[in-house]
């Protein structure tokens, strides 16, 4: 249990931390309207648009979560030469996120997920993306920018949505550089790329991703969960592993110990982006010197807040403190 004064101390340190996020940045567009008729041109609903909304997604949502908690955030990623790229960087800058590490590409669009909704239901999603790996020129540009900044950082997050940015070469080189300078590196992995993150400080896969990381069937028992977590940590040479387990909470796998943390949520409406919130808060807390268990409990609290909202969302320090006291009774 983290006492209230200790929690406040950790949260207050957030604003002094510098975190780099390297990963697949996206722009999420929501087109919201009503349906009252079927098109005479084809058997499809006609949506009368009432609202169009853009929000940060993917690695950009991790950045947004960090910024909302007061951290100084440095964005590393790739965008296209299109209007969506301009819109994405403009949004990042509005949240005071440093965009010097973003590279513009002429051969791929800015990643965008366009969703059409009516009556709180998604009717259609359009994905604008090219997923081929970035070329060596882009890798070199990102590494050059990263090398100039790394000494001033408190931690690095690698946010992999398997859209081509975090190539094997780039991921391994970033981890190598970070380890040589004793920097924290936490990874939100795509299972197919798990081997790229050998030697990182930690990873934050969910239960399904964890089983896929090592080619195992989805675990049905706690014994199977423990076996998978221990195997990932050892195989990838991680300092520790934070596995998120939906309604069963989180498990922290360390060298000689496993700790389980139950989950809490006021009411679950939408789990979209909850993993981004977890890795942002967990990494930020670790960078303040908080223990693994303290960091996981604080991250668990933040996730419990955001799943009570629709769509990707962020949480602030006041909300974490309020909900933490409610679920852990830290003042008793």
Image: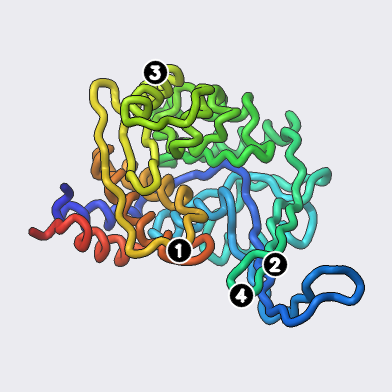
State the image coordinates of residue 229 (x, y, percent, origin top left).
38, 27
Badge 3 or badge 4: first in the primary sequence:
4
Location of mark 2 (residue): 116
Badge 2 or badge 3: first in the primary sequence:
2
Badge 2 or badge 1: first in the primary sequence:
2
**CA distance for labels 2 and 1:** 18 Å
Nearest to the observer: residue 211 or residue 3? 211
Nearest to the observer: residue 13 or residue 279? 279
Which mark is on residue 269?
1
Location of mark 3 (residue): 234
Sort mark 2 into few (<14), some (14-19) or many (20+) by Cα contacts within 10 Å. Answer: some
Residue shown at 48%/50% (left/top)? 276
Position of 151 relative to 50 (above/below): above
State the image coordinates of residue 239 (x, y, percent, origin top left).
35, 25
Helix, strand, or loop for circle 2? strand
Mark 3 or 4: the one toward you? 4
Helix, strand, or loop for circle 4? loop
**CA distance for labels 3 and 4:** 47 Å
Location of mark 4 (residue): 119
Sort mark 1 into few (<14), some (14-19) or many (20+) by Cα contacts within 10 Å. Answer: few
**CA distance for labels 4 and 2:** 11 Å
Please say whether residue 38 is visible from this viewpoint: yes
Which colour scheme appears in the figure?
rainbow
| Quadrant location, the C terminus | bottom left
């Amino acid at each position: 249990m983290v006492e209230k004064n200790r929690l406040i101390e950790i949260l207050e340190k957030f604003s002094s931390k510098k975190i780099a996020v390297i990963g697949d940045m996206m722009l999420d567009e929501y087109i919201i309207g009503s349906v009252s008729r079927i098109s005479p041109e084809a058997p499809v609903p006609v949506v009368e648009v009432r609202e169009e909304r853009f929000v940060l997604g993917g690695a950009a949502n991790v950045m947004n979560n960090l910024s909302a908690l007061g951290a100084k955030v440095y964005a590393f990623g790739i965008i296209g030469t299109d209007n969506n790229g301009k819109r994405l960087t403009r949004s990042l800058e509005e949240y005071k996120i440093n965009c010097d590490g973003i590279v513009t590409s002429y051969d791929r669009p800015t990643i965008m997920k366009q969703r059409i909704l009516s009556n709180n239901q998604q009717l259609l999603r359009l994905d604008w993306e090219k997923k081929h790996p970035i070329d060596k020129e882009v890798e070199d540009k990102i590494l050059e920018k990263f090398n100039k900044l790394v000494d001033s950082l408190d931690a690095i997050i690698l946010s992999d949505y398997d859209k081509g940015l975090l190539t094997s070469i780039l991921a391994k080189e970033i981890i190598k550089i970070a380890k040589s300078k004793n920097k924290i590196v936490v990874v939100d992995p795509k299972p197919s790329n798990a081997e790229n993150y050998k030697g990182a400080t930690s990873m934050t896969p969910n239960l399904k991703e964890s089983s896929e990381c090592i080619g195992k069937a989805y675990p049905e028992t706690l014994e199977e969960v423990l076996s998978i977590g221990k195997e990932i940590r050892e195989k990838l040479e991680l300092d520790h592993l934070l596995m998120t387990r939906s309604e069963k909470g989180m498990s922290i796998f360390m060298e000689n110990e496993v700790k389980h943390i139950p989950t809490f949520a006021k009411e679950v409406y939408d789990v979209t982006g909850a993993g981004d919130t977890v890795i942002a808060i967990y990494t930020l807390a670790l960078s303040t010197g908080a223990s693994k268990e303290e960091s996981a409990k604080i991250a668990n609290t933040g996730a419990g807040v955001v799943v009570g909202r629709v769509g990707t969302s962020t949480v602030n320090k006041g909300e974490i403190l309020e909900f933490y006291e409610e679920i852990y009774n830290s003042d008793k």
